[in-house]
Image (tube, coloured by chain):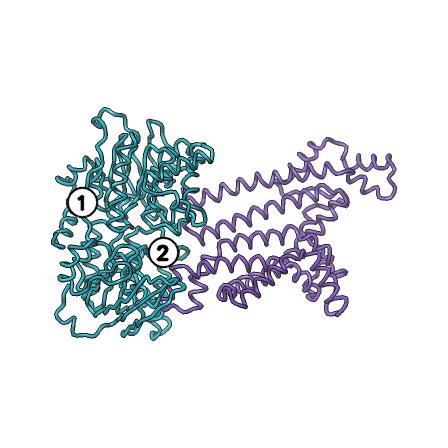
Chain colours: A purple, B cyan
Amino acid sequence: MSGLRSFVARRLLLGVAQTAAVVLLVFALTEMLPGDAAVALAGDQPDPARIEAIREALRLDRPAVERLADWAAGLPHGDFGTSLASGRPVARYIADGFGPTLLLASLTVALLVPLGFGLGVLAARHEGRLLDRLVSSVTLAVYAVPEFALGVLLVTVLALRLGWLPPTAVGYGTDLLGHPAALVLPVLVLLARPVCSLVRLVRAGMIDALASPYVAQARRYGVSGARVRYTHALPNALAPAAQQLARTIDWLLCGVIVVEALYVIPGLGTVLLNAVAERDVPVVQGLAVVFGVLTVVLNLAADLVARRLAPRSGVAA
Amino acid sequence: MNHENGTTAGPVAEIRDLRVEIDGRAVVDGVSLAALPGRVTALVGASGSGKTTTGLALLGEYPPGARVTGDVRLSADGPAGYIPQHPATVLNPARRVRALLTDIARTQVGHLPPGRRRSAARERVLRALAEAQLPDAAPLLRRYPHQLSGGQQQRVVLAQALLLGARVIVADEPTTGQDALTKSRIVDQLAAVAARGIAVVLLSHDPDVVRALADEVIVMRSGRVVESGPAPDAWRAVQAGRTREPLVDQPPFPQADGSTGTVRPVLRIRDLTARHHDGARGTTVVLRAPRLNLHPGESLAVVGRSGSGKTTLARCLAGLHRDQDGRILLDGTPLPPSLRNRGRAHLAAVQYVFQDARAAFDEHRPVLHQVARTAVRLRGTDADTATREALTTLASLGLPEDLVRRHPGRCSGGELQRAALARALLARPRVLICDEITSGLDPITRRGILDLLTSLVRDRGGLSLVLITHDLDTAARADRIAVLDGGELVEHGPAERVLTTPQHPFTVSLVEAAARLTARTGT
């Protein structure tokens, strides 16, 4: 049996268990919150009899375990259940929210990779000199700014004061691609911190790799500078960066709640936020499954990439 | 390898009055050297004598922060080739073997039409590998460096230099870590390199190899040249000096108590088969050992050429090679194949000392802490007791307290190897595996370590030794010898019997090669 295949199989099995655990935990936590969907639906007329009626109509009066089992039984058929708040299928919610989230994530990653690796390699080449110190201190400073603060700052300066860009995506619905200007600020905010951590990781890895005997040998034997940097040194600096990149993509797809809320982008983060506010448990659970699976798959992919980049690590038992 | 016409050509590389200073201390002082085409110039000296610094100067490389005066000139165009002591360090761990070779070849095929460049480059690479005694190396090119044996790694690095068309090749301890057969082949190999008209600068502390190869000998001590001249004269002068290791009269390891038939073996190997993954191409069997016993207090030498499966056998015992079938029994209980499934007692019972002691220590923590940690982790002693025990053990191995409180970077290779032994002993092992632990060391240090192993087996009742080695002189000290060839256990028996009346043709050739190497150098 191939070691790689059994590794992937083991990790996928573990991933299924992890996702199940996440769903259980999320369910338990939403159960523990005061109030439920009936209270939320009753709105500004919290009449006990009315709440009880809604509860009965939504079948919320049954025991929690029964409700969970009911919902879980639908999963194998791809049925995520129906929303308590609107009665629409949960899958519909997820599909709607996924578009804007994926668009933001792809744009961010498309800029993140060249920027992160390029600046990292550049800083490593100039280790200890002005350019390196500049890149290092700026990345550290930007990394220290939380995204909600940066988001508000950018809106204030670039949108409200200077009026260069729309402050939010209000009114554009899910057709964000038709209004690229509205995407600039959110992508900038999403990009800010991941770029910094990636640059610093790549820089550290590259400094080690550039000082290594194998890079010295390649230089000694007349391989050109750029080739040495990108094909001989960089592969050794990539493994930790690949892990970081996977975590970043995971974060972009599963939890950019603050940025989506700030710029009013109808992505998965907004769907999650609304669902929690309405105690819409099936929607929250559906999102938990999607986020769990994404996390498992992305981390597995990162481990496979790392294995390819550091093949020796596969040797030790 | 004296060539009559060799002296007529001018030197292809020359050093005049080189002085390299680090922090005001001269590591090389007043060294001059001329590398003539087709000649082998040997720089001889113990570790720390400045020969590597001199050799690297030919490549235009100096230690960081060094102040250099003097003259280094390469008259030939193109860079000098370099074969370092540990060839693995110059092979990129994240790239396949072909990566650098192809990059070197690519620069040489620029004149061809683009469509033919790739195949021409590949052809050149394969030819260089064949010239470095790696024929049919196509499958090798797809492997990662860690999937090659030490000998193969060295030949790949030599192939890089040959591919480059270097006019000078600096070989740093090229025979270190090689078995007698390979050693003899490397001698032929470097002779063949010289015969192509390439100047070879050989840095070595192996007297046999220097005497077999060198046309000119430069003996260095503490950064200075103490003797230099044409090989025969220089050697006569050296005979009286200290660079020659007394290879004779090595005391054997103490014999195991009692006859091996009556005492129960501490370790039994039954039908062991180990495999190696070769990319997506499936698996290769790299070791087959149907039956091997190790008795308490016994030392077993495992000999064979590089790539014969010696280290794989050791890794199987230590639980570092997961892909194995068969059984390894410790005192009758089977050991799980992977050390992740072994309990603390099992981990402590089988201890491993690696070839590269420097790589086996964390450079940021004092040696003492790392040694003491074994007792804490594997025997559950508290930190204070562990430190006291570590100090006692280290002292008994000749390492004083002020030395072991330093970081590994400030200890010599020999000292670190002693510390690595102490670290293994702190687990109170039943079986101590020593994997080529002396092959990176100079003769005097090596002698010290081997004497130390002798006294360990004598003084620590019941400790068994598995000695992985390519060196028959070292193996001769053991009680029993197991011979591996191409992953097969071809012969095993009492050391004296195997060395004097070898049965298997491979053992015969191994013993003969060792004898030939000694004979050729006129000992």
Residue density around tag 1, few if under 14, some if 14–19, many if 20 or more, within 10 Å: some
Q: Which is nearer the eye, B96 or A52?
A: B96
Q: Decide if residue B94 is on the left or right side of residue B480.
A: right
Q: Residue B132 at what x, y percent from top left? A: 25, 60
Q: Which is nearer the eye, B154 or B376?
A: B376
Q: Say which element carries label 1.
A: helix
The residue identified by callout 1 is B506
One can see residue B14 in this view:
yes
Write the residue at 17% across / 64% down: B215
Q: Residue B321: which quarter of the image?
A: top left
Q: Residue furthest top?
A: B262
Q: Decide if residue A241 is on the left or right side of residue B53.
A: right
Label placed on residue A114: none
Q: Residue B200 at what x, y percent from top left? A: 23, 64
Write the residue at 22% across / 56% down: B186
Q: Residue B198 at what x, y percent from top left? A: 23, 68
Q: Please name the amino acid that badge 2 sits on.
A: Thr
The residue identified by callout 2 is B89
Write the residue at 19% across / 74% down: B9
Mark 2 belongs to chain: B
Mark 1 belongs to chain: B
